[in-house]
Amino acid sequence: MRHIVLCLMLGGVVAPVWADEVDIENGKNLHNTHCNACHQSMSEGDPNQLYTRENRRVTNAGQLQNQVQRCSLNLRLEWFDTEINDVSAYLNQQFYHFKP
C-alpha cells in the first residue's frame, strides 16, 4: 500500500488527502520504538489493544492522522510530517484499514 491519508490543517479543520510517498517500514519502526511502551502501560500489557478494541476513538483516516500527531506532541518526539505520515500509514495498514 503506497497510499496514506495526509491531513491539511485549515484553521483546525482536518481534510484528508491521499499521497503516494510513505514508508510503512519506517512507520513500523517508529511505532515500535516510541509508541509501544506507552500503549502497553495504558492497556494491561497489550499495546495493540488500543487499536483493536470495540470502542476505539479513531473511526476514520483523518482522526488517525490527528491522533498520531497528538501522541507525538505529547511525547515531545518532534516528528516531521513525513514521520507522522509513515506511522499513520503503518497503523492503517496493520489495524484500521480505512479506505481512501
Image: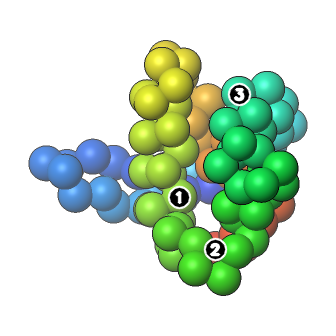
Query: Earlier along the polypeptide chain: callout 3 or callout 1?
Result: 3
Discs 2, 1 touching: Cβ within 8 Å: yes
Nearer mark to the viewer, of 2 and 3? 3
The crowd level at tag 3 (other Cα within 10 Å; few <14, some 14-19, many 20+) is some
Label 3 amino acid? His
Location of mark 2 (residue): 98
Q: Would you say residue 23 is visible in this rendering?
A: no
Q: Quadrant of the N terminus?
A: bottom right
Residue 64: assigned label: 1
Q: CA distance from mark 2 to mark 3?
A: 23 Å
Label 1 amino acid? Leu
- On screen, residue 75 versus residue 48, left or right, reads left
Name the residue: 75% across, 34% down: 37
Nearer mark to the viewer, of 2 and 1? 1
Location of mark 3 (residue): 34
**Observer-nearest of 99 and 21:** 99
